[in-house]
């Protein structure tokens, strides 16, 4: 088998082979659930060893890696609440030490992400909160179903100290959806782990809890929030604590009902053909500037793998 990162006899634009990246899956990465006869649904996301495979592709400072881990778990949890074909992405862009934070997940659970950070600008002292890392900017959630479908995107200014609070601000202002998010990502004895717990209040009309009064629905929602708030970071990240056991501890008295779990996988979608397509959009001068000793090197920002192109074989745009 030839190395897809190196020039070969196969035309670049036809070489769709994936580079050597981990083939790892979290078979029960997302556990959806709802509370019977109550206006509450949610997802528990546990990336397990998949988190370590994704997060250790880059040698980022721990604070940056932790925030990316939270973003990956959040993207996985939010994407599984939607019906779409394509990708769901979370993007934060600000003027802080982390200029760009991106995580995306396909409808099949292929997960990837990266953080573009300036280590020299990281705040000193204890691990900084997300707002200190990102600075002022915006948070965007995007559903991209391909060129033939209209792309949906919601954007809000970054508001809140943590990524969970920023997400809550987005849903409160853009979606008018009552929701609450708990996020965790940290190194453990088994490697990096990341997790999320997401609760949503669903509409009473025609939905769960439709027969309840508004006051009873509000009480059920507040009770669910109070119970979820007892969860700890250690519980969220504990591989030995099965998702159903953790959810049972939280909601067993509230009519917990589990749906079929959803798998997640290492989802970088780079290939030589994709990057060759990007190069084909540059002019002659730009391509010459990129080349070093006759070779153009392009690095996938997600999996951090270098692809090498012979400058003489790359055709300029136009």
Image (cartoon, rainbow, N blue to C red):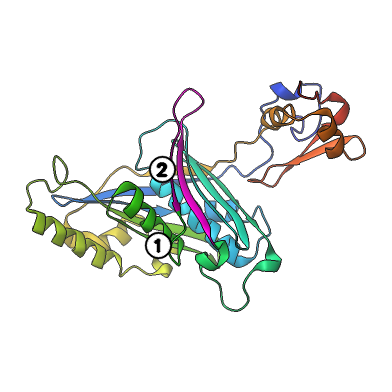
Q: Position of residue 189 (x, y in %)?
A: 55, 68
Q: Label 1: few (<14), some or many (≥20) within 10 Å?
A: some
Work out whether residue 105 can be spotted.
yes
Residue linked to disc 2: 79
Q: Position of residue 43 (x, y in %)?
A: 33, 51
Magenta-highlighted stretch: main secondary structure? strand
Up-down: is 208 above or below 195?
above
Residue at (32, 61) in percent of width and height: 246
Label at residue 269? none
Residue at (39, 32) in percent of width and height: 84
* First reached walking from the N terminus: tag 2 or tag 1: 2
Q: Position of residue 41 (x, y in %)?
A: 25, 50
Dividing the picture into quadrants, the one containing residue 184 is bottom left
Q: Is residue 167 magenta?
A: no
Q: Is residue 275 left or right of residue 249?
A: right
Q: Secondary structure at mark 2?
A: helix
Q: Position of residue 138 (x, y in %)?
A: 50, 53
Q: Is residue 316 left or right of residue 182?
A: right
Up-down: is 20 above or below 58?
above
Residue linked to disc 1: 165
Q: How many marks?
A: 2
Residue at (55, 41) in percent of width and height: 267
Can you say which quadrant of the picture contains the C terminus?
top right
Residue at the right extreme, as displayed: 293
Q: Label 2: few (<14), some or many (≥20) within 10 Å?
A: many
Q: CA distance from mark 2 to mark 1?
A: 18 Å
Magenta segment range? Answer: 136-156
Q: Is residue 73 left or right of residue 250?
A: right
Can you say which quadrant of the picture contains the N terminus?
top right
Residue at (69, 40) in percent of width and height: 20
Work out whether residue 240 can be spotted.
no
């Amino acid at each position: 088998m030839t190395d897809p990162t190196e020039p070969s006899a196969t035309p670049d634009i036809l070489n769709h082979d994936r580079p050597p990246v981990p083939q790892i899956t979290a078979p029960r990465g997302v556990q959806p659930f709802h509370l019977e006869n109550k206006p509450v649904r949610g997802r528990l996301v546990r990336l397990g060893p998949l988190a370590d495979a994704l997060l250790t592709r880059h040698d980022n400072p721990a604070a940056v890696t932790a925030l990316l881990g939270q973003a990956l778990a959040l993207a996985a949890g939010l994407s599984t609440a939607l019906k779409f074909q394509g990708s769901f992405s979370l993007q934060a862009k600000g003027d802080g030490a982390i200029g760009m934070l991106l995580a995306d997940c396909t409808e099949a659970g292929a997960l990837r992400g990266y953080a573009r950070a300036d280590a020299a600008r990281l705040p000193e002292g204890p691990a900084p909160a997300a707002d200190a890392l990102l600075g002022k900017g915006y948070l965007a959630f995007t559903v991209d179903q391909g060129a033939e479908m209209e792309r949906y995107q919601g954007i809000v200014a970054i508001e809140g100290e943590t990524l969970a609070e920023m997400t809550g601000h987005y849903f409160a202002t853009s979606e008018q959806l009552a929701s609450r998010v708990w996020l965790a990502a940290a190194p453990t004895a088994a490697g990096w782990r990341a997790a999320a717990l997401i609760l949503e209040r669903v509409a009473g009309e025609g939905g769960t809890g439709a027969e309840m009064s508004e006051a009873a629905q509000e009480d059920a929602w507040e009770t669910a929030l109070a119970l979820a708030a007892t969860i700890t970071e250690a519980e969220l990240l504990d591989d030995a604590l099965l998702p159903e056991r953790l959810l049972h501890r939280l909601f067993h008295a509230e009519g917990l009902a589990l749906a079929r779990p959803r798998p997640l996988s290492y989802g970088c979608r780079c290939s030589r053909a994709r990057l060759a397509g990007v190069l084909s959009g540059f002019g002659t001068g730009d391509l010459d500037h990129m080349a070093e000793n006759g070779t153009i090197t392009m690095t996938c920002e997600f999996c951090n793998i270098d692809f090498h192109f012979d400058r003489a074989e790359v055709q300029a745009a136009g």
